[in-house]
């Protein structure tokens, strides 16, 4: 279920004030919450997997877990991590 935020703004024209509302565009953060494509930080993934960030950094260094580099930052695609977890099941 997709919900949109509504914002109120004032339009000034011909010396009169009219108040209107508009639907705000969906933000990246809203996509994460609603289950859309999401990019996670090392802290979020370590909390999700219940491992220390240091352990996760070691896994990244050994290329044991799928990750992305955004400049110097490590990021993880939620879907890639879910698929990786499924492949690790015995």
Image (spheres, rainbow, N blue to C red):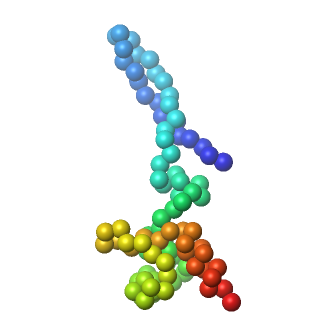
Split into 4 quadrants, where in the image is the C terminus? bottom right
In this picture, residue 73 sits left or right of residue 29: left
Task: Point out the residue furthest to the top here.
Answer: 14
> Residue, x 48% and y 64% (percent of image)?
39
- Residue 53 location, quadrant: bottom left
Between 61 and 46, the one lying in front of the other is 61
Q: Is residue 51 above or below residue 14?
A: below
Between 88 and 52, the one lying in front of the other is 88
> Residue, x 60% and y 80% (percent of image)?
85
Between 1 and 60, the one lying in front of the other is 60
Residue 73 shows in the view:
yes
> Residue, x 48% and y 54% (percent of image)?
29
- Place of residue 46 in the rendered image (x, y in percent of width and height, measured from the top left): 49, 78
In this picture, residue 30 sits left or right of residue 69: right
> Residue, x 49% and y 38% (percent of image)?
24
Residue 52 shows in the view:
no
Count of residue discs = 0
- Place of residue 3 in the rendered image (x, y in percent of width and height, measured from the top left): 60, 43
Q: Is residue 34 above or below residue 41?
A: above
- Place of residue 63 in the rendered image (x, y in percent of width and height, measured from the top left): 44, 85
Task: Point out the residue furthest to the right here.
Answer: 90
Q: Is residue 18 above or below residue 43?
A: above
- Place of residue 61 in the rendered image (x, y in percent of width and height, measured from the top left): 39, 86
């Amino acid at each position: 279920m997709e919900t949109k935020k509504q914002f109120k703004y004032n339009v000034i024209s011909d010396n009169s004030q009219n108040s209107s509302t508009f639907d705000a565009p969906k933000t990246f953060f809203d996509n994460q919450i609603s289950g859309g494509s999401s990019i996670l930080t090392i802290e979020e993934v370590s909390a999700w997997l219940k491992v220390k960030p240091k352990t996760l950094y070691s896994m990244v260094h050994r290329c044991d877990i799928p990750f992305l580099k955004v400049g110097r930052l490590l990021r993880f695609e939620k879907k890639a991590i879910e698929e990786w977890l499924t492949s690790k099941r015995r």
